[in-house]
Image: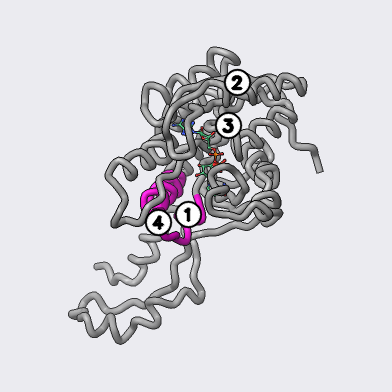
Amino acid sequence: MAEVKFDDRVAVVTGAGGGLGKAYAMLLASRGAKVVVNDLGGSFDGVGADTRAAQLVVDEIKAAGGEATPNYDSVSDWESAQAIIQTAIDAYGRIDILINNAGILRDKSLLKMTIEDYKLVMAVHMDGTFYCTKAALPHMREAAYGRIVSTASGTGVYGNFGQANYGAAKMGIVGFTNCVKQEGAKYNILANVIVPQAGTRMTATVLPPNIIDKLKPEYVAPMVCWLASDHCDVSGMYFMAGAGYFSRSAIVEGPGVFLDPDKEITIEDVEANIEKIKSLEGGRGYGSVTEQTGYVLSNLKLD
Ligand code: NAI
């Protein structure tokens, strides 16, 4: 099996001043990538800014013989997201890889959550992923090459108490990636999602220290870097990774039932069929909504 290398590749990793992003940046750089280490340097709940976070990781990459450039802008608005991508263009003339990783938390039950808690979490995760990807895309199209890895969360996929803002943003990123997959396909731009589990300052608030120590970000990085490599041949997928566990998760749709649309369909008809409607047995995923609509319409008797 050929070694995965990133020679002559340029990567932007957002939120790479610590935690998971740092592990991605270090691994990419150790395999030859030139890395833009972006980090705003604020607190885990999105307060403040500090250039040291990104700078320290750049120093570490350079000390290990790698190439890196810092960027201290926020992903969360359009102008500064463009500046992040421009840093790669100015320093290295291209961008091949974008890892949308920056994130914050504002956990509270929906009853107590403020509108600011909602907006800030959406701005960093959802807007940040949208803006950085949109800013990178013209360069990737031009080069007919791109690898985009964005970050979701088990909270979005499965739900968690006190994280309605975060869960909404994280699943929004999955929906976004489903569409980027379609638009990037003809330019050799692949877009996938990582659903990580790692001991970082973000999870240190909820997990005990002995588990945090075992959940090293370095266990997630190989999956992300494979998705970011030219060995990757999948798009529009999301993968779970953490503690040595790697798996693919997916949205699947059960075969359902087809009731006769030429007759009246009542609420009671739905109730009579609810077990079949709920069942995922024989379920499948679809590559696009067009494909899924084809299945739905297959039952229609057209003139
Ligand atoms: P972390 O807090 O160590 O790293 C996040 C980094 O993003 C920080 O260095 C922070 O300064 C930076 N950042 C925050 N807002 C920014 C902004 N507006 N612009 C640029 N940088 C910004 O947390 P961790 O755990 O490494 O999280 C990385 C990503 O993984 C996040 O998207 C997080 O939601 C996601 N995630 C992490 C999980 C875990 O188990 N650690 C679980 C599921 C998802």
* Secondary structure type for disc 4: loop
For the residues labelled 3 and 2, the Cα–Cα distance comes to 10 Å
Disc 2 versus disc 1: nearer the observer: 2
Does residue 106 show up magenta in the picture? Answer: no
Q: Which mark is residue 287?
A: 1
> Which quadrant does the C terminus fall into?
bottom left
Quarter occupied by residue 273: bottom left
> Which quadrant does the N terminus fall into?
top right
Does residue 164 show up magenta in the picture? Answer: yes
Which mark is first along the chain, 4 or 3? 3
Q: Nearer the viewer, residue 253 or 127?
A: 127
Q: Which mark is residue 162?
A: 4
For the residues labelled 2 and 4, the Cα–Cα distance comes to 33 Å
Which mark is first along the chain, 2 or 3? 3
Label 4 is placed on what type of residue? Gly
The residue drawn where x is 46% and y is 23% is 73
Q: Nearer the viewer, residue 132 or 2?
A: 132
Q: Which residue is mark 2?
A: 55
